[in-house]
Image (cartoon, helix red, strand yellow):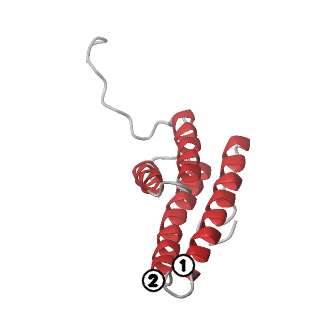
Amino acid sequence: MSDTEAKPFETDSPRDESGDRILAIVNYVLCFLAFSNGITLLIAAILAYVRRDQAQPWLKSHFDYQIRTFWYGLVIFVVGFLTIWIFGLGALVWLLGGIWLVIRAAVGLIRVVDGRPQIDPNGFWL
């Protein structure tokens, strides 16, 4: 093999985590924007699904957390939609769900900026 030939991609080499860290931060910003536009939460979940298998374990916990946030948020949206006709209960469900989403995104953003993993990425609370 000469020095000018291309070497095959090494899958065992450690990845640079800065790109995944930036993506995790962008995903949390998309979660904040989902308070007024739910489609951004879907985009964040898709990006998290794409990157979580290649990410470092501490960043994988953030991507898992973002994916769970999407699924829990979808359930909150559906429950709110189904209960909107009960004296506006659905609006209250959506409001509380939006507050939950913003708090969850803020806590996740603080942890990823500090370089800490999520404590319980599969849990409903923080």
In the drawing, does residue 20 fall left or right of residue 107? left
- Residue 21: horizontal and vertical position, in percent? 58, 40
Count residues near mark 2 (Cα–Cα under 10 Å), then give few for <14, some for 14-19, many for 20+. few
In the drawing, does residue 88 fall left or right of residue 45? right
| Picture quadrant where residue 124 is located | bottom right
* Callout 1 secondary element: helix
- Residue 49: horizontal and vertical position, in percent? 42, 55
- Where's the C terminus, which quadrant? bottom right
Q: Do the residues bearing badges 2 and 1 touch, measured as CB atoms within 8 Å?
A: yes
Count residues near mark 1 (Cα–Cα under 10 Å), then give few for <14, some for 14-19, many for 20+. many
Q: Is residue 123 visible from the viewing direction of this image? A: no
Q: Earlier in the sequence, mark 2 or mark 1?
A: 2
> Which residue was labeled with disc 1?
90
Residue at the location (55% across, 49% down)? 33
Q: Does 126 appear above or below 7? A: below
Q: Does 35 appear above or below 3? A: below
Q: Does 88 appear above or below 20? A: below
44 or 33: nearer the eye? 33
6 or 82: nearer the eye? 82
**Amino acid residing under circle 1:** Gly
- Residue 82: horizontal and vertical position, in percent? 45, 83
Q: Does 29 appear above or below 64? A: above
Image label count: 2
Q: CA distance from mark 2 to mark 1?
A: 7 Å
Judged from this view, the residue extending furthest toward the front is 87
35 or 60: nearer the eye? 35
**Amino acid residing under circle 2:** Leu
Residue at the location (43% across, 49% down)? 47
> Which residue was labeled with disc 2?
82
* Callout 2 secondary element: helix
